[in-house]
Amino acid sequence: MYQTTYLASPLRKEHMNAITAPVAAPTEPAIPRIVTPAIINLAGAELRRIVGAELAAPFARAPRRFGDLTVELVRSHSTWRLYLADLSPIRQTTCDLWATAVSAPSVDWQRTQDGCLVWCEWVEPTA
């Protein structure tokens, strides 16, 4: 058994005020993140690298967030899927940029009725 009643606290509340500086609330709004096509290409290549790293594994997935946009690349055996989800409807140009970034062939996109979730699927032959 440990006896903690006789241990002195090395950091008491009066000492903490001297150690840590007061935290002020930010006065400037956060800088909005702009996702450029170059960033999409880099992120897509990274997703492709992660998901395709071990083709012997039957399943792999890699999600990423870019502000409100969630991008997820999933592989199940030789079937690949790319999911895009956002709080607002996703434009076709955004879909095409991400498909190109993950090296998807020409794909048909499916979408929910509100357009906030889109996905595509393709099959790649196994080596």
Image: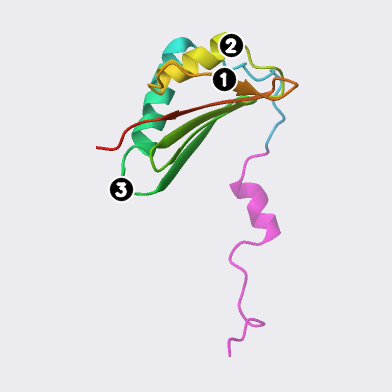
At mark 3, the secondary structure is loop
Q: Quadrant of the N terminus?
A: bottom right
Farthest bottom residue in view:
1
Q: Is residue 116 left or right of residue 74?
A: right
Residue at position x 54%, y 16% from top? 95
Q: Is residue 35 visible?
A: no
How many numbered badges does the structure rendering display? 3
State if disc 2 and disc 3 touch (CB < 8 Å).
Answer: no
Residue hosting label 1:
109
Farthest left residue in view:
127
First along the sequence among labels 3 and 2: 3
Of labels 2 and 1, the one closer to you: 1
Residue at position x 41%, y 22% from top? 104
Q: Quadrant of residue 11?
A: bottom right
Q: Amino acid at mark 1?
A: Trp
Residue at position x 44%, y 33% from top? 80
The vertical placement of 20 against 31, above or below, is below
Within the magenta stretch, is there residue 56?
no
Q: Is residue 112 visible?
A: yes
Q: Amino acid at mark 3?
A: Ala
In the image, the segment drawn in magenta is: 1-22
The vertical placement of 15 against 121, above or below, is below
The vertical placement of 13 against 51, above or below, is below
Q: Amino acid at mark 2?
A: Gln
As measured in the structure, the alpha-carbon distance from the residue carrying label 3 to the one carrying label 2 is: 33 Å
Residue hosting label 3:
56
First along the sequence among labels 2 and 1: 2
Q: Quadrant of the C terminus?
A: top left
